[in-house]
Image (tube, rainbow, N blue to C red):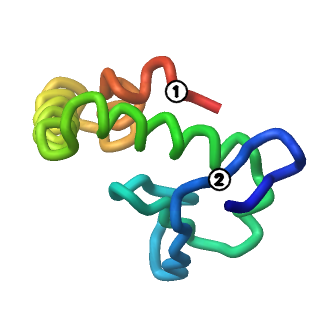
Amino acid sequence: MQILSNLIKIKYPIIFAPFMHVSGMALFPFIVLSKKKFIHNPQIIRHEIIHLKQQLELLILPFYALYLLNYLVNLLKYKNHNKAYLNIVFEQGNRF
């Protein structure tokens, strides 16, 4: 278990994927970060931990299905990736 700034205990394995075009991603049970420096960013880590908890609450696979469906509906509605992403219900209360 790693401790980030004495505030967040990270009990999830962290994987680094430098090819990603986003800061981080939660793919149960992993936190995937695009850069090693993001492991020291409590906002990013907290954001991804919240997603991991959401995944557990919805029994993992239904979370992914609902997340994708919500994104696709938003993409049709807004015709813009950023707006579609920001309006996903799982992102609404989980912004940094």
Q: Quadrant of residue 51?
A: top left
Q: Is residue 93 above or below residue 43?
A: above
State the image coordinates of residue 80 (x, y, percent, origin top left). Answer: 30, 38
Q: Is residue 34 above or below residue 63?
A: below
39 left or right, relative to 88: right
Q: Label 1, label 2: how many angstroms apart (C-alpha)?
A: 17 Å
Q: Callout 2 environment at 10 Å: few (<14), some (14 to 19), or many (20+)?
A: some
Q: Residue furthest right?
A: 6
State the image coordinates of residue 61 (x, y, percent, origin top left). Answer: 14, 45
The tally of labels here is 2
Q: Residue at x 47, y 81 (%)?
A: 19
Q: Callout 1 environment at 10 Å: few (<14), some (14 to 19), or many (20+)?
A: some
Q: Is residue 23 above or below residue 16?
A: above
Residue linked to disc 2 = 10
The amino acid beneath tag 1 is Asn
45 left or right, relative to 88: right
**Which residue occupies the foreground of this view, 92 or 46?**
46
**Label disc, if present, on residue 74 of the rendered structure:** none
State the image coordinates of residue 22 (x, y, percent, origin top left). Answer: 50, 60
The amino acid beneath tag 2 is Ile
Q: Residue at x 51, y 74 (%)?
A: 15
70 left or right, relative to 55: left
Residue linked to disc 1 = 94
Q: Residue at x 49, y 18 (%)?
A: 93
User: What is the quadrant of the N terminus in the image?
Assistant: bottom right
Q: Secondary structure at mark 1?
A: loop
Q: Residue at x 43, y 62 (%)?
A: 30
**Which residue occupies the foreground of this view, 63 or 84?**
63
